[in-house]
């Protein structure tokens, strides 16, 4: 699959720089979710609203950072912003191959999700009680009392939260695809065919603030990185990401709010 933007033409990062590029957003997110969030919850602010607020700030910063890096590099390479953003058009065959890999990745992640609780027990990881219910695989929101799901902040009929949650889902997609895949992955090509593997594993480890989901995260991360690596395009990953996030994440919120 030939790309209009040749990845090897961009300045490659050193191993130390790559680790730092993942460590910086991970450390900021860890601070936000493991220090700022519990402080807010301890001061009687509703955790579902505070988690969404903290996540919005963190992800918005990551989107801005990714766009800044890509825009600066597109000027140095004398190519358009969209080319450096890896928004390359694909043929129908390429789309089918990419979608097949992504669907397989999602199917495997569903299978792996059953190992999350054993993984938590094996590693001794704990899910902090200030985290929202959608990050706790042991909670079935359809069978759990609303006051347990969101104490002090009613979700039923809360249309504001629907809009707020939609914004966080969109920012999540933009941040992850623009920063980690469009900007970082092309700058890891000195690793050869292992670049997508390293990118996928490091992206999963970036989620230090919720490592109990690592088995699920690493499968999805590897599938996404592989698709972008093979196609040299962000479109398939972006399309599947937005459909999956809004079908799974948004649908769950809508059922509760309108239920």
Image: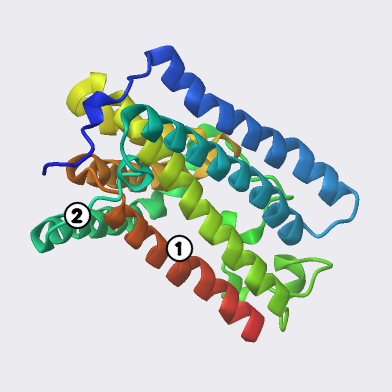
Q: Residue at x 31, y 47 (%)?
A: 224
Residue under label 1, please give it: 245
Q: Earlier in the sequence, mark 2 or mark 1?
A: 2
Left or right for 48, reference 85:
right
Relative to residue 256, is residue 117 depicted above or below? above
Q: Residues within 10 Å of mark 2 (few under 14, many from 20)?
A: many
* Element assignment for label 2: helix
Looking at the picture, how far across and down is residue 186, in whole percent?
Answer: 30, 31
Looking at the picture, how far across and down is residue 80, in whole percent?
Answer: 33, 43
Looking at the picture, how far across and down is residue 168, in whole percent?
Answer: 59, 58
Distance in Å between CA atoms under marks 2 and 1: 18 Å
Left or right for 172, reference 178:
right
Residue placed furthest toward the right: 43
Front residue of 197 and 10: 10
Q: Is residue 208 visible?
A: yes
Residue placed furthest toward the bottom: 259
Quadrant that contains the N terminus: top left
Front residue of 85 and 207: 85
Q: Residue at x 37, y 13 (%)?
A: 14
Q: Residue at x 62, y 65 (%)?
A: 165
Residue under label 2, please give it: 98
Left or right for 63, reference 242:
right
Front residue of 75 and 207: 75
């Amino acid at each position: 699959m030939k790309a209009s933007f040749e990845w090897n033409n961009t300045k490659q990062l050193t191993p130390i720089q790559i680790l730092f590029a993942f460590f910086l957003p991970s450390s900021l997110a860890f601070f936000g979710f493991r220090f700022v969030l519990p402080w807010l919850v301890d001061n009687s602010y509703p955790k579902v609203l505070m988690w969404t607020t903290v996540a919005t700030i963190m992800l918005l910063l990551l989107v801005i950072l990714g766009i800044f890096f890509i825009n600066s590099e597109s000027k140095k390479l004398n190519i358009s912003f969209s080319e450096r953003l890896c928004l390359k058009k694909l043929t129908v065959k390429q789309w089918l191959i990419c979608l097949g890999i992504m669907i397989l990745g999602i199917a495997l992640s569903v299978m792996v999700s059953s190992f999350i609780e054993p993984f938590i027990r094996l590693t001794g990881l704990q899910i902090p009680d200030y985290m929202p219910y959608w990050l706790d695989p042991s909670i079935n929101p359809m069978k759990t009392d609303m006051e347990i799901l969101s104490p002090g902040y009613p979700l039923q009929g809360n249309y504001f939260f629907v809009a707020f949650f939609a914004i966080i889902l969109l920012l999540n997609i933009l941040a992850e695809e623009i920063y980690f895949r469009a900007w970082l992955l092309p700058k890891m090509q000195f690793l050869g065919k292992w670049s997508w593997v390293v990118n996928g594993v490091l992206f999963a480890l970036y989620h230090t603030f919720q490592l109990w989901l690592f088995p699920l995260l690493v499968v999805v991360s590897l599938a996404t990185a592989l698709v972008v690596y093979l196609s040299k395009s962000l479109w398939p990953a972006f399309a599947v990401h937005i459909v999956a996030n809004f079908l799974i994440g948004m649908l769950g919120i809508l059922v509760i709010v309108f239920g």
